[in-house]
Every structure is written in structure tokens, then in C-alpha cells.
Image (spheres, rainbow, N blue to C red):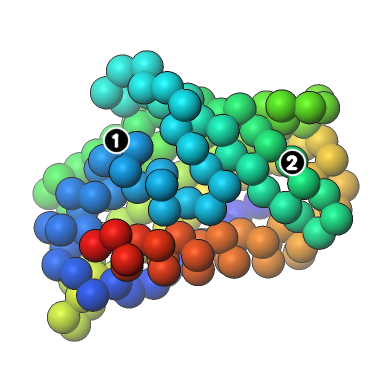
Amino acid sequence: MLIEDSFVVEASVDRVWSVLKDIPRVASCIPGAKITETVDDRTYRANVGVKVGPVNVSYDATIVVEQLDDATHHAQFSVNGNETRGRGGVRAGMSSDVEAAGSGSRITLRADAKISGVVATVGGRLIEGVAKKQIAAFAENLSKLL
């Protein structure tokens, strides 16, 4: 499932980029996410909870920073998570880009996710709607942090 969205925040590209590179700090902006362990400077363990329709699910996830390009303000991550209860999981490649937009910065997020388990049974449209809401909440929380 491909998910792409973008939003603008009122902060400079350099300010936004410095926060986005700080994984534990930026993770605090993601609803239901908490970094539980820093394995090294590119690998983190997290717990992520989400509600999709009637289903509440929690994942134990490993996040790996694959690329951080300071020149282009592009980041790539891989996320592998397993349901804390159940047999499902999520595998995703994610990227973010930051560019100037007027007096602020536009952040573009992309994710290519493969979801299995109970969440996959509720359907793609519902999952996509939840993802858009999560991104909107992330944008609001990031704006407050900046």
C-alpha cells in the first residue's frame, strides 16, 4: 500500500531538518508511538499503537535510518513491526523530503507498507484514512515542537 502526503510548517528548512533527523525527538510527534530503545545511531526500537476502525493494535517495531542526506534534506527509513498480540505485522519503506515553501517548509512523506494480520482484514481505504489522520496529527505536533 502506497501512502503519500505533504504539509507545510512555519519553520526554516534547516530547523525542520534538524528535528526530523533526531529520531527520538520526532517520534514524540507521532500519535501512539514511543521509542523504547536506541540500539545505535541508526537503529531504534519502538512501540506503536493505532486504531483502525474497530481494531486496536500495537506493534513492536524496529526502525532503521537507511539514509540522511543533509544536502537534499532527504531521509529514508525501513520499519519492521510485529503485532504485540497476534500474528500480523507491518513492513515499510518510508521517506521524507523537506523543501522551502514560502516562509516555511514543505514536508513530503511517502510510505510503501505491507500489512498483515488483523489490520489487513479491515481494508485498504480504512487504513489509508487512518494514515491521513495520523499524518495530520503528526504535522500539528511537529508544528508545535518547532
- In depth, the one of 76 and 134 nearer the eye is 134
Identify the element where label 2 is drawn: strand
The residue located at (60%, 55%) in the rendering is: 2
Placement of 133 over or under 96, stated as above or below: below
Relative placement, left or right, of 28 versus 53 is left
Q: Nearer the viewer, mark 1 or mark 2?
A: 2
Task: Please give the residue where the numbered disc 2 appears in the rendered image.
Answer: 57
Residue 22 sits in quarter = top left
Res 119 visible: yes
Relative placement, left or right, of 78 versus 124 is left
How far from the left and from the top, in percent, is residue 56?
Answer: 77, 46
The residue located at (68%, 37%) in the rendering is: 58
Q: In the rendered view of the protein, which quadrant contains the C terminus?
A: bottom left
**Number of residues whose C-alpha sits closer than 10 Å to that of mark 1, classed few (under 14), some (14–19) or many (20 or more):** few
Query: In the rendered structure, are the residues bearing label 1 and label 2 in contact, judged by CB atoms less than 8 Å apart?
Result: no
Placement of 43 over or under 132, stated as above or below: above
Placement of 123 over or under 33, stated as above or below: below
Relative placement, left or right, of 134 versus 108 is right
**Number of residues whose C-alpha sits closer than 10 Å to that of mark 2, classed few (under 14), some (14–19) or many (20 or more):** some
- In depth, the one of 112 and 141 nearer the eye is 141
Which residue is at the far bottom?
102
Task: Please give the residue where the numbered disc 1 appears in the rendered image.
Answer: 67
Total labels drawn: 2
Relative placement, left or right, of 46 versus 18 is right
- In depth, the one of 126 and 2 nearer the eye is 126
How far from the left and from the top, in percent, is residue 111?
Answer: 52, 50
Identify the element where label 1 is drawn: strand
The residue located at (35%, 32%) in the rendering is: 65
The residue located at (37%, 17%) in the rendering is: 39
